[in-house]
Image: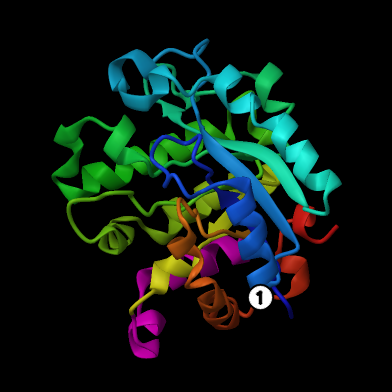
Amino acid sequence: MKIDHDLHVHTNISLCASPEATLEMCMEQCKRLGIKKMAITNHMWDHSVSGWEEIGRFYAVQDADYVFAIRKEIDEANKKGANFLFGCETEYSLKERRPAIRPAAAEQMEVLLVPNSHTHITMPKSFYEPHRKHAEYMIDSFWDIVKSDVAKYITAIPHPFLAVACPYDNHMLLNEIRDDEFKRCFDAAAEKGIALELNPNYIKNKSLSEIYDDPILRMFRIGKECGCKFTVATDAHSAEHFENYHLIYVLASLLDLREDDFHPIVRS
């Protein structure tokens, strides 16, 4: 089975991305790696959803209008032979307990990503300890996301339950979550057609033995058993983030994934 898509890539209009992260760079990586379909998913917070004011930082800039401005450039690139999908990676608003995007914007996205694991941005710092409290935050936010009014537009949950910029080993947080808790979340995601994102960087710098014992396999196997589909993504913010793309075959093999285990958007 050939894997030839990447549904989570940032350009330099995401203010946390490298200046080199242009659409031209993305086209070069597609050609180098044989990627046939790539989603441009810059960070976005729809300012009609409250919560961005407390977070501050770049979401004061990265609203819907800012992210939509790249669509014309994407359309021009596609006319030249690229196969980019327009999308975004929005946030989870704890204040409203929903994704930080409204249906009017969500329905215009070809790919919509909503993480439950940007806890470094959205979660109160007091939730880092005990670890179970951190895990419960991600369980609750996952549930809010898949039950939201934009759930039907969501393509995938990026880096599910893998807390970003965590001050401790984020893989170990998975051991704080019971099988039945994962099953409840993933049953709901499967019902809504929301995929789980596989990222080759989950396993970089690990031996095969370490990968085999990693708790992410337990999580994704439960997701597969629940009927969840999968997408592949690098979450690239620079050219170097594509370097481990080949490792996705290791994850796919260990999970025994077949073509019909992937989201329909990458099979069309």
Residue 7 can be seen, yes or no:
no
Q: Position of residue 110 (x, y in %)?
A: 74, 38
The span picked out in magenta is 206-226
User: What's the residue at 53%, 43% (across, down)?
Assistant: 11
User: What's the residue at 47%, 50% (across, down)?
Assistant: 20
> 234 and 84: which one is in front?
84
Q: On the rendered structure, is 122 left or right of 69?
A: left
User: What's the residue at 38%, 40% (across, down)?
Assistant: 16
Q: Looking at the figure, which quarter contains the N terminus? A: bottom right
Q: Position of residue 258 (x, y in %)?
A: 72, 75
Q: Position of residue 73 (x, y in %)?
A: 71, 35
Where 193 sits versus 251, above or below?
above
Where 44 sits versus 82, above or below?
above
Q: Amino acid at mark 1?
A: Leu
Q: On the rendered structure, is 215 left or right of 5?
A: left
Q: How many marks?
A: 1
User: What's the residue at 23%, 48% (across, down)?
Assistant: 132
Q: Is residue 208 magenta?
A: yes
Magenta span: chief secondary structure: helix
List the residue tagged with mark 1.
257
Q: Looking at the figure, which quarter contains the C terminus? A: bottom right
Residue 102 is drawn in which quadrant?
A: top right
